[in-house]
Image (spheres, rainbow, N blue to C red):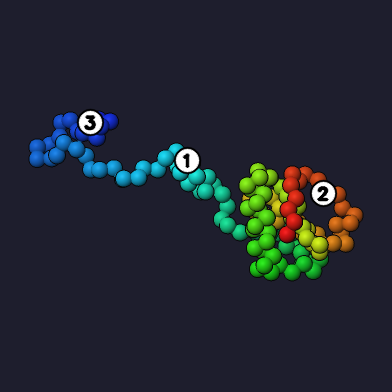
Amino acid sequence: MIQRVTGQLTGAAPGQGKKTQNAPKAQAGFGAILQQELAKKQPAPGVTFSKHAISRAEERGIQVTPRLMDQLAGSVARAQAKGAANILAMDADKAFIINVPNAKVITAITQDEMKENIFTNIDGAVFL
């Protein structure tokens, strides 16, 4: 059977109608399909910590609470919207270097250490 662009069949078997089954009423447009594909490639919502970041947070006494995790996830979402790749997410007490595409905290720093550090290889900063 050959289907034409109009949805009609040629050479249909006897007793079959001339039209194929109706296509879904709302076909996804290019933008919707693109968004679906991009969503498949993005990490699951939330932020994870690298082994290095976990050990630094423990060493430095940084408590990782659900509220902090929500703040970090929000920082990643805002940074993604701006196209940032690596950010410094900070408040008055602590800072985190985060790889935005992977939503992964690379390291954690306390206020005392922030005073003497220079942050390189970041393209954005977000205040928690």
Query: Callout 2: helix, strand or loop?
Result: loop
Q: How far across and how far down the image is residue 125, in percent?
A: 75, 50
On the picture, is 28 further left or further right than 127?
Answer: left
Q: Is residue 98 left or right of residue 9?
A: right
Instruction: State the image coordinates of residue 73 (x, y, percent, origin top left).
Output: 64, 58
Q: Quadrant of the C terminus?
A: bottom right
Q: How many labels sit on residues? A: 3
Disc 3 to disc 2, how far (Cα)?
63 Å
Asked whether the residues under the numbered discs 3 and 2 touch, taking CB atoms below 8 Å apart as contact, a structural biologist would say no
Query: Helix, strand or loop at disc 1?
Result: helix
- The residue indicated by pointer 2 is 119
Residue lying at the far right of the rendered structure: 116
Q: Which one is in front in this view, the residue at disc 3 or the one at disc 1?
A: 1
Q: Residue at x 56, y 49 (%)?
A: 42
Circles 1 and 2 in contact, beta carbons < 8 Å:
no
Mark number for residue 31? Answer: 1
Q: Is residue 62 visible?
A: yes
Alpha carbon distance from label 1 to label 2: 37 Å
**Dots 3, 1 in contact, CB < 8 A:** no
Residue located 65% across and 43% down the image: 83
Crowd rating for badge 2 (residues with CA inside 10 Å; few <14, some 14–19, many 20+): few
Residue type at the position of mark 2:
Phe
The percent position of residue 9, horizontal first and vertical second, equals 19, 33
Q: In the image, which disc is placed on residue 2?
A: 3
* 116 left or right, relative to 46: right
Give the residue type that dot 1 points to: Gly
- Mark found first going from the N terminus, 3 or 2: 3
Residue type, mark 3 in image:
Ile
In space, the residues marked 3 and 1 are separated at their CA atoms by: 29 Å
